[in-house]
Image (cartoon, grey):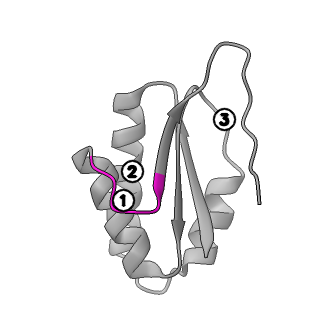
Amino acid sequence: LVPVVLSARTGAALVDQAARLRSFVGERPELSVLDVAASAAGRSVFEHGAALVVGDRAGLLRELDALVAGETAGSGVEATLAAGGGIGFLF
């Protein structure tokens, strides 16, 4: 399983980012989940975020579709950071 982390300044921007990523990945079948996760990991951290824990492309596309629709497909977690807060990943 691979975490794909998204972050945005607002909830609406997070949904927009998920929609753009869904379109980008959907149009490029050569991209692996690891490629997408590595690209997303280097981005800035903002107040609104989502972590999609997926095992394959189909799972990633399913989770992105759910995030865009305002639903949770199963492994996605969405959160808003408190002022001065940070993000921690527990394994």
Q: Residue at x 46, y 55 (%)?
A: 76
Say whether residue 57 is left or right of residue 43: left
Magenta highlight range = 71-76
Work out which quarter of the rendered image holds the C terminus and state it. bottom right
Of residues 8 and 2, which is closer to you in this image?
2
Q: Secondary structure at mark 3?
A: loop
According to the picture, the residue beneath numbered tag 1 turns out to be 64
Residue 21 in percent (x, y) is at: 41, 58
Determine contact: label 3, label 2, CB under 8 Å.
no
Crowd class of label 2 (few under 14; some 14 to 19; many from 20; radius 10 Å): many
Q: Residue at x 57, y 68 (%)?
A: 36
Task: Give me the C-alpha separation between circle 3 and circle 1.
Answer: 18 Å
Q: Quadrant of residue 16?
A: top left
Identify which amino acid the numbered label 2 is placed on: Ala
Task: Give me the C-alpha separation between circle 2 and circle 1.
Answer: 6 Å
Residue 4 in percent (x, y) is at: 57, 60
Q: Quadrant of residue 87?
A: top right
Magenta stretch: helix, strand or loop mostly: loop
Q: Secondary structure at mark 1?
A: helix
Q: Residue at x 51, y 80 (%)?
A: 31
Which one is earlier in the sequence, the residue at label 3 or at label 2? 2
Q: Is residue 8 visible?
A: yes
Identify which amino acid the numbered label 3 is placed on: Val
Determine contact: label 2, label 1, CB under 8 Å.
yes
Q: Is residue 28 visible?
A: no
Q: Secondary structure at mark 2?
A: helix
Q: Quadrant of residue 65?
A: bottom left
Of residues 68 and 17, which is closer to you in this image?
68
According to the picture, the residue beneath numbered tag 3 turns out to be 45
